[in-house]
Image (cartoon, rainbow, N blue to C red):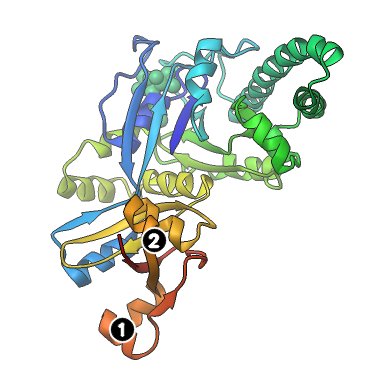
Amino acid sequence: MKIGLIGLKQSGKTTIFNALTGQEAETGFGANKLQVNMGNVKVPDSRLDTLTEIFNPKRKVNATVEYVDVAGVEGEGSIDPALVNQIKVTDALLVVVRAFHDDGVFHPFNTVDPMRDLQNLMEEFIISDQVIVENRLKKLEKSVKSKKDPNEVKEYEALLKIKDALENLTPLREIDIDPVEMKMLRGFQFLTLKPVLVVFNTDEGDNGEEYLEKFKEEYGDKKGVKAVAISGKIEEEISRLEDEDKEMFMEEYGIKTLARDLIIRESYSLLGLISFFTVGEDECRAWTIKDGTNAQKAAGAIHSDIERGFIRAEVVHYNDFIQEKSLVKCKEKGLLRLEGKDYIVKDGDIINFRFNV
Ligand SMILES: Nc1nc2c(ncn2[C@@H]2O[C@H](COP(=O)(O)OP(=O)(O)O)[C@@H](O)[C@H]2O)c(=O)[nH]1
Ligand SMILES: [Mg+2]
């Protein structure tokens, strides 16, 4: 699962990428424009930390998400096709919006106005999708008239509907698309179909309340968009410190929790992902599945053999387990259940799969 960082030039994308991943990718005006930065990040999960304390395993393995940092948007009406191609392959967008004030840092529109920039970016995403739709419609027009291929006719009709929505400046994630049409449209990797996490990059000491409030007014009731705030530069610095220095630094600056952790968790849930756990002396581990996955499919996240040879799943939810702190006691109290292949796995289930290959 990949999340793409996108935003105006110099809005702090690479800075935030560094804060999220702990990498040291080049920032600032001189940074190589064509460079794509990629990094896997552990999803913080206090439940996994607690399980690790209880089982004291050799290894703890967190769930991960991958971030991709690309070049910046110029803000001149249409996004560079090369950039669209880089960002198309991601599953969600992290839209970085500049909310920090620094005369030394270039801004494509010269002034700091986060809501204006956000609006501008959202419109550019719509325009980028419109270009794709119109090109495809043009291609289909001829063949729809002459050949009457039923699939092409269906695709043509679906695209007309989408064209209408985009003309009304409605992102595609907000309209109802039935599953059959969705299957046809998925391949286009439309930008406005992707879930969006807006990240206001604020000044040091600014929790971004003002921007988050304005965001709520304009986007609060919209589907598939959420917002958070981070002081990118300071969190980039913190990410480079050793653990003990981190705490001291955070105390000194009055930072209680890192926005970085919130962003990672929010991006995970934005993608519709949940975690189940496996526990034991060797390893405590969080596994990633799509919300709504059944037990047999979930077993496949661990190994295809376990999915194929699935017999049963022994399941106890973390919240129940934590009352007893022992699987044996959970079993005695009837908290550890046996579930079949169609059981829908919940976020926080602790599972032991029985299988036979
Ligand atoms: N003052 C301040 N400067 C920042 C902040 N975030 C980024 N910058 C600076 O803005 C410039 C552009 O940042 P960069 O991450 O390269 O932006 P990108 O072009 O979106 O990748 C760099 O000089 C950063 O140091 C911030 O939160 N506060
Ligand atoms: Mg950059």
Q: Position of residue 64 (x, y in %)?
A: 34, 45
Q: Please name the residue that numbered disc 1 is placed on.
A: 324
How far is disc 1 from disc 2 in space, using C-alphas? 18 Å
294 shown above or below 172: below
Q: Is residue 325 visible?
A: no
- Residue found at the far right of this picture: 145
- Please report the residue visible at 58 percent of the width from the left and 14 percent of the height from the top: 79
187 shown above or below 130: below
The image quadrant where one finds the C terminus is bottom left
Answer with mark 1 or mark 2, whichever residue precedes in sequence: 2
- Residue found at the far bottom of this picture: 332
Q: Please name the residue that numbered disc 2 is placed on.
A: 276
Task: Ligand 1: give its quadrant.
Answer: top left
SS at circle 2: strand
Q: Position of residue 185 (x, y in %)?
A: 67, 30
The image quadrant of residue 124 is: top right
Q: Of the residues tagged 1 and 2, which is closer to the observer?
A: 2
Side (left or right) of 90 relative to 249: right
What is the three-letter code of the residue carrying label 1?
Glu
Side (left or right) of 221 relative to 283: right
- Please report the residue visible at 55 percent of the width from the left and 14 percent of the height from the top: 110
31 shown above or below 47: above
SS at circle 1: helix
